[in-house]
Image: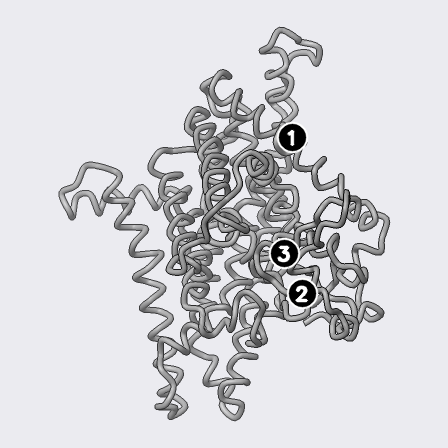
Amino acid sequence: MSGPTDTVFDLLKTPIGRLLRRRGIRTTMRLVMLLAALIMIVHGFMGPSLAPKNLATTLTWIHFRGILIFSLLLAGNFFCFSCPFMLVRDFARRLIRPRFHWPRALRNKWLSAALFALILFAYELFALWSSPFWTACLILAYFAAAVGTDISFKNAPFCKFVCPVGQFNFVVSLVAPLEVGVRRHATCETCRTKDCIRGTPPSGLVTIQRGCELALYQPLKTGNMDCTFCLDCVYACPHDNVGILSRLPAAELLTDVRRSGIGYFSRRRDLAALVIIFTFAALLNAFGMIAPVYSLEHWLAALLGVDRLAPLLALLFVFFLFVAPFVLLLGASYLGSRINGDRTSKPLARATRYAYALVPLGASMWLAHYGFHFLTGALTIIPLVQSAIAGVGLPILGEPFWTLTGLPKSAVSPLQIGFLLLGLTGSLVVTRHLAEEDLPHHALSASAPLAAICLLLFAAAVWIILQPMDMRGTFLTG
């Protein structure tokens, strides 16, 4: 939970923060992102079919993913702040007001976790990195899903319960150094209007300011889960008591307090499942880009007598995202209880609580993977823009410099190892802290099984990134 504003850094009190406080800056950033998305869609449908020469594929799968993971870990969920889907949604809501409440049975992360896995599956099955057309279709589908969901249902169910990219952002933000939080809790105790959650009521000609659509009441909010950094609470608070505050990265994983709009982490099996899929998918997504995956697919095809990719991929996804994590975490929980003679705790409940320790390691693997593609291909945007402008009959930037790439792989590899070491350290620290809360007199032995899983995943991650990797969507070679 955030402390007093005098003891922590507050981004909103800096020049950048004063810019963010201007109501028009969010709209401006969303307009820029919307323009970029529209250009990518048009170029995906009408531009070159070769992925390295198309803005849709290269910007989506190299630049967007790289910038996203770096911004999440260095600052926080500022992508959701500038989300173009919400700009279109807000405009559509002026024409069609939502009438329904999101179904109670779907007020959890099960749907979004499944969609996250499904998008990764489609990425591999349809080779989205090499198809500008299908990448453009995916972007359009995202707009349609966001608008369709939120013009039908009140508040922001797409962000909270549906959006796979949003869930990715929420999980990575758990280890970010900033969070939207209350500056002085004493001020909230005397507040009677609760505008941060209810919004500012209309008064005469004054435009209404909505409160948090994701049901995060600021005085009881802890951490970044479900927070889109939209700053509606900042704009709505009549006491100027909400800031973007610094905190120890991953600190919220160490506590199991009741969180507004979320409840207790230890009781949210859906959230734990999302975290587990997030972590293991980081390895699986990278594994799909190295040569051993093809040997494994050929072996499975011969073993099962199957010659189609879809069932083979489905089998790999089910095993690596569901079966293996379930066996490993339940086994670690059971073993940890047995080692310490604790026969009262249930393995599933214990695994649910300990699953959150995987977040730092999972985030570091996504960073190592996406960061590799971004850093080695960052400059490819220059010839892409040159080519795209020339393609509409305006060759004002000259011939495309297709030889431009980025940092050499030899320079990026040490960074990847460093990212993974940071993630491993974070996961081990969280694991030990949870064990100390669980069994304070046997913390070392209680944490050992899960620590072993972290070390296993770390070793697998290092092995993967040291393999020659497909440079999908670029002219580079692995």
Kind of residue at disc 1: Leu
Residue occupying image coordinates x 18% and y 37%: 307
Local packing at callout 3 (Cα closer than 10 Å; few below 14, some 14-19, many 20+) is many
Residues under numbered marks 2 and 3 in contact, where contact means CB atoms less than 8 Å apart: yes
Q: Which residue is mark 3?
A: 212
Q: Amino acid at mark 2?
A: Gln
Give SS at disc 3.
loop
**Label 1 sits on residue:** 379
For the question of whether residue 283 can be seen, the reply is no
Determine the image quadrant of residue 395: top right
Residue found 58% across the figure and 76% down from its top = 255
Mark 1 or 2: in front is 2
Kind of residue indicated by mark 3: Cys
* Earlier-in-chain disc, 2 versus 3: 3
Q: Residue at x 74, y 75 (%)?
A: 189
The dot on residue 218 is 2
Q: Residues within 10 Å of mark 2 (few under 14, many from 20)?
A: many
The structure's colour scheme is one colour
Tell me the mark number nearer the camera, choosing from 1 and 3. 3
Tell which of 106 and 478 is nearer to you: 106
Element assignment for label 1: helix
- Locate residue 407: give its quadrant: top right
Question: Horizontal and vertical percent for residue 243?
Answer: 76, 60
Which image quadrant for residue 386? Answer: top right
Circle 1 Cα neighbour tier, 10 Å, few/some/many (<14 / 14–19 / ≥20): some
The CA distance from mark 1 to mark 2 is 41 Å
Residue at x 79% of width, y 59% of height: 238
Which of the two residues, 269 or 383, is positioned nearer the viewer here?
269
